[in-house]
Amino acid sequence: MSEAATSITPLGAGRFLLNRDGRQRIAYATQAAGATWVFLDGEVMVIGAPTSSTTRTTSADDQASLAAPMPATVIAIAVQPGQKVAAGDVLIRLEAMKMELPVRSPRDATVVAVKCREGELVQPGVPLLELDET
Amino acid sequence: MFTRILVANRGEIAVRILRTCRVMGIETVAVYSDADAGALHVSLADRAVRIGGAAPAESYLSQPAIIDAALATGAQAVHPGYGFLSENDAFAAACAAIGLTFIGPSADAMAKLGSKTAARRIAESAGVPVVPGAVPQDQSDASLIAAATTVGFPVLLKPSEGGGGIGMKEVHAAADLPGVIAQARREAEAAFGDGTLYVERLVAKPRHVEFQILGDSHGTVVHLFERECSIQRRHQKVLEETPSTAVTPALRARMGAAAVALAKAAGYANAGTVEFLVEGRGDDASFYFLEMNARLQVEHPITEAVTGVDLVRAQIEVAAGGRVPWTQDQLTQRGHAIEVRVCAEDPRQGFLPQAGVLALYREPSMPGVRVDSGVVEGGEVSVHYDSLLAKLVAWGENREAARLRAREALARYPILGIRTNIPLLMRLLAHDRFVAGDLDTHFLETEAASLVPPDAPPSDDARAVAAMAQRVSAATATPAVDSSWDPWTSLGGRRV
């Protein structure tokens, strides 16, 4: 009896029976945020997501980007327009979900403009300040 | 006994408290912010009262709003859960002033223990060892630097008020202090409204071992053994277990006696936790009092799992004037329990918190596993609150049995739509050092490279499942409209 090496049977409500060479596993999958999310044995894989290379450098510890990584509240602005900053300097402190998220300068530069205010709820992707060109 | 209790919290702990109230035949009142109108805890209560805006300061931290809700609904007692107002002695006093029972310690005991410096003095007076440290009366940078130099580097800089690791900083050299002081002070002020700082010697490779205690208003205090909480990230616990692999019967007896002595010295009633740092392992280990948490702890279910008690029920009984329901001799530890905290955060992005909709969320159910959660499928994880979604507690006859159950349960715990730390928890539970019980509070930091999931491309199996899911989704989106679509022919690989 010849059978496809892999078969997948939808079981409904996001459950799938995965059979590879006769070995069965339950997987879960759903569409969310423009991608397909799959859960298999404790691992999560997101397929067809917008490339994550832009977010790879951000982290809760060290924001290389000058935008919030997620919706967050501005708790402190540490710089003013005209101020010279060094790579790694904390420019703005954000808070989200009880965590402080520092926004650091990616390089030595001069602050051109601050585009947020303390207490403001800011959205991801929107630059919080402008640095001069290198 | 009370006939109606207001639960002044949200998320998993509100749900957990509501469930015990139901079992006791006590009516419940939930409170909620605008962000939580559709939350699980709201739908599980007999009554629900909106108390304000999404920001905690406008709702779950608003004392007048919560007291008004209690008065309006005729609640006789308030259970504060953990976090929010649970360790706010002014709130406890405000409740007492209007005849509302605060289910927790007295405002007086809370005030004494809430301050780390006062708690240290109580510990010293009760003969409980403390970590060498100092709190400068004058909080200038110069005095803090002098105190740190006296204590000896490395030091830990901590807010005098509060807990949960917020504002706590490790400092390895005097030169680093000024910058760190400013940040610690700001975080302490933001979180606790008091920027007073305290300096303590940093214990090398310490374990964090805490003792659960329960006291009543008649002067009885018992302990319910230890919880090992060494697996932490930035002082936020990630995994807790009991018994501790470092604690022997002789050490347990010494530490338990110290915890009870401290609670008695503070005149403590209700549930509380005495935190210790343990240096070394076994009979000869040293332990130092860290602080007392005057509330129910996040990780209390592992104590419930090995002792078989309901701590929330006991809290309610002693708050109503009852006695501690067990003698020390009646309390025993059976088997082993491990709790993992399932959080909406992405370990691969520096543990960045994740907010959004839980597109798919299914809790595992299997022997020896308990899931305390405050979320449902389709619910939204808000940016306004912390990232804890659920606690998964596995019990087993021994540590290995509990570990294997925890791992299997996580492998059957799909959460999709936002990233969680489940892949990291799976790796943690399989890590050689964890399996061997070789833990210290730096474990997560030291072993991060092998715990953070790699940025690998999806497996062939995952791609195949995704492709099928996309086809099923497309078919559902256009039901029976496309006559050329026939599931029996187009779903390649589907087994009929």
Image (cartoon, coloured by chain):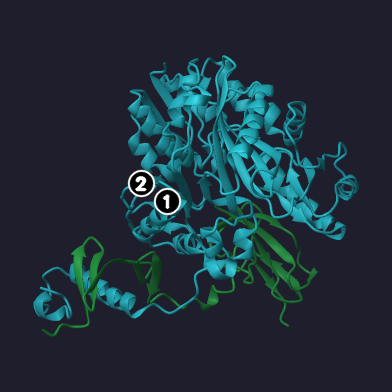
Chain colours: A green, B cyan
Q: What's the residue at 55%, 70% (across, down)?
A: B450
x and y, in percent, of residue B338 in the image:
47, 49
Where disc 1 sits, the SS reads helix
x and y, in percent, of residue B54 in the image:
49, 44
Q: Which mark is residue B368?
A: 2
Amino acid at circle 2: Gly
Q: In terms of image quadrants, where is residue B378?
A: bottom left
Q: What's the residue at 40%, 46% (across, down)?
A: B397
Amino acid at circle 1: Ala
Residue that lies at the very extreme toward the bottom in this rendered image: A2
Q: In front: B59, or B287? A: B287
Q: Chain of mark 1?
A: B
Up-down relation of residue A44 to residue B279 (above or below): below
Q: Which mark is residue B402?
A: 1
Q: What's the residue at 56%, 26% (across, down)?
A: B222
Quarter holding the C terminus of chain B? Answer: bottom left
